[in-house]
Image: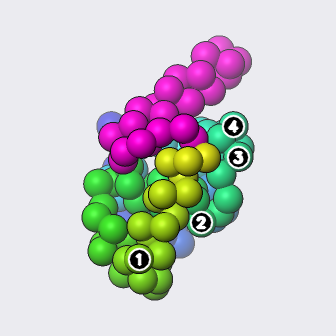
Amino acid sequence: MDAIPKNKDSLSKETAAPDVRHREGGFLDGCSWMQICSSLQLSKREAEICNLALKERTEQQIAHELGISAHTVHTHFERLYRKLGVRSRCQLIVCLFRTYMNVMDRSPRD
């Protein structure tokens, strides 16, 4: 398993999406993450929220990391749920994984 660099400046374009960095604890490379975001038509902020949700961050932690209020994070989650047709964070994560699997099925094989 490859080690994830500690210094975000050392991340290559293959491991970091332009707006959503592949940070410690992440499981997707930047290209896969961008494909998921594109497929679900996520905005930059929605992608950030989902990325942090995948890393099991609480609304308070997400708010602190993004420099916004916990109420705003909660509102982002509510809108994401509506947009993606889910009713909980668990269903949001399942939706992201299903989309990932669909993206992987469409990817050209080496």
Q: Are marks 2 and 1 in contact (CB under 8 Å)?
A: no
Answer with mark 1 or mark 3, whichever residue precedes in sequence: 3
Answer with mark 2 or mark 1, whichever residue precedes in sequence: 2
Answer with mark 4 or mark 1, whichever residue precedes in sequence: 4
Q: Where residue 91 appears, x then y in whole percent?
A: 39, 37
Looking at numbered disc 3 in the image, what kind of residue is underneath it? Answer: Gln
What residue is shown at x 53% (from left), y 72% (from top)?
9
For disc 4, the marked residue is 39
Numbered disc 3: secondary structure: loop
Looking at numbered disc 4 in the image, what kind of residue is underneath it? Answer: Ser
For disc 3, the marked residue is 41
For disc 1, the marked residue is 71
Q: From the viewer's perspective, is residue 1 above or below residue 109?
A: below
| Chain part drawn in magenta | 84-110
For the residues carrying marks 4 and 1, which lies nearer the camera in this image? 1
What residue is shown at x 38% (from left), y 55% (from top)?
53
Q: Which mark is residue 1?
A: none
How packed is label 2: few (under 14 Cα within 10 Å), some, or many (20 or more)?
some
96 and 6: which is toward the camera: 96
For disc 2, the marked residue is 45
